[in-house]
Image (cartoon, grey):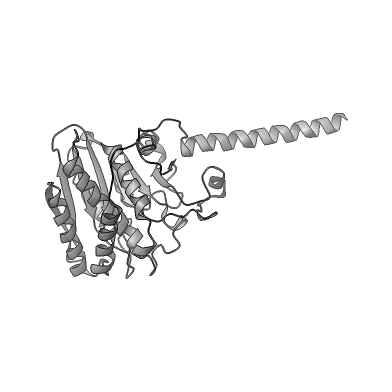
Amino acid sequence: MNEKTNIYRSIFRITLAVGVVIAMTWFSLSQPTFKKNTPSPLRVEAKKLENHVKALSIDFYPRNYGNIQNLNKAAKYIEGQFKLSGARVEIQEFEVEGKKYKNIIARYNIGQGRKMIVGAHYDSCEDTPGADDNSSGVAGILELASLLGREKINREIELVAYTLEEPPFFGTEEMGSFVHANSIQNKDKIEGVLVLEMIGYFSNNKNSQSYPMGLLKLMYPDRGNFIAVVGNLSQRAFTKKIKIRMKGATDLPVYSISAPAGIPGIDFSDHRNYWPLGINAVMITDTAFYRNSEYHGPKDTYDRLDYEKMAKVVAGVFEAIR
C-alpha cells in the first residue's frame, strides 16, 4: 500500500512539475492578459485593400530584385498613395550590386511626440505573385496612410515601404529595412516599429494553424483565424503593449509571442534590423508558412485572401499607433 502511495505521489509531483513548466513557458511566451482596447469606430474599406493587392501582385508582377522596372512601378504607386494622404514623402535610394533600389517613406505630424514607425516590404520572392507576401502588408500601410490623412492623431507617424526583404538579400546589410534602420538619427525619440508581414490569409478550419514547436500547440489556437504580434525576449513589454492596444479594437482575435530569435519565424522579417540598435520592433503577421501553404509559392494570389479580416488588422494597427 505504501509502495503504491509513493508511486502515486511521484506521478503527481512529476505531473505538477511539468504543469508548472508549461504554465511558466505560457506566461513567458504568450503574455496572457485580460487588458484590451475599446472598440474602434474606424471602418477600413476591404475593397480598397483588395485593389491595392491586385495592383501589386498583378499589375507589377513580378517584382523581385531582378525586375527593377516593376519594382520602380510599385514604388511609384506607393509614393502616389502616400502623397494622396497628405504625407511628406521621401525616397531613400541606395545601391546594391550596381543597381539602385528605393525605400518610400511617408511622414505625418513631424515633431509631435514620440514617433511610431510602421513598415512593410513591397518586393516579392522570385517570380511569385506575392499577394499575401507581402502585397497584403503594403496594402495595410497604404490604408493606414488613408486613415492618417483624415483622422486626428497627436503624435508623429512614419510609414515605410521597404525593398529587398526577400532572398538573396534577407539577413544581409542590403535589406531595405537595414538601410532605413541605420539611417535613424534620434533613436530615443522612437517608441517602436511595427512591421506588417503577411496579414491577409485566414482560415477557420480545424488544424489550419501549425507552429514551430509542439509545445506551442498547447498555448495557441489550432485554427488560423487570428493575427499575431511577434517580438523577441528582450522587448516583451513592448510586444504586450501592442497586443493590448490591438486586442478589442475589433473582434479579430489577437495573440502575441515573445521568444528567442532562434525559433524559426520569430525574426523572419524587417523588424529584425531594428533590434541590434535597441529600438523596439515587432512583426504583425498571419504567421506566414505556419498557416499559408502557398508561402513563396505560385498560388499566393489575391483571391485567397480575406479582405474583411485584413481591414480589421489595419484598424487594430491604427489604434495601436494612435
The outermost residue toward the right is 1
Please indicate whether residue 132 sits to the left or right of residue 59 in the image. Answer: right
**Residue depicted at 24% across the width and 54% down the height:** 162
Where is residue 66 shown, x and y percent of the image? 24, 69
Where is residue 254 shown, x and y percent of the image? 42, 42
Res 309 visible? yes
Quadrant containing the C terminus in the rendered view: top left
Of residues 105 and 50, the one nearer the viewer is 50
Of residues 244 and 48, the one nearer the viewer is 48
In the picture, residue 11 is in which quadrant? Answer: top right
Where is residue 73 shown, x and y percent of the image? 17, 65
Report the number of discs. Answer: 0
Please indicate whether residue 11 sits to the left or right of residue 268 in the image. Answer: right
In the picture, residue 81 is in which quadrant? Answer: bottom left
Res 182 visible? no
* Above-or-below relation of 36 to 102: above
Where is residue 43 shown, x and y percent of the image? 28, 44
**Residue depicted at 46% across the width and 35% down the height:** 31
Quadrant containing the N terminus in the rendered view: top right
Please indicate whether residue 210 sits to the left or right of residue 174 in the image. Answer: right
Please indicate whether residue 143 sits to the left or right of residue 233 in the image. Answer: left
**Residue depicted at 41% across the width and 44% down the height:** 252
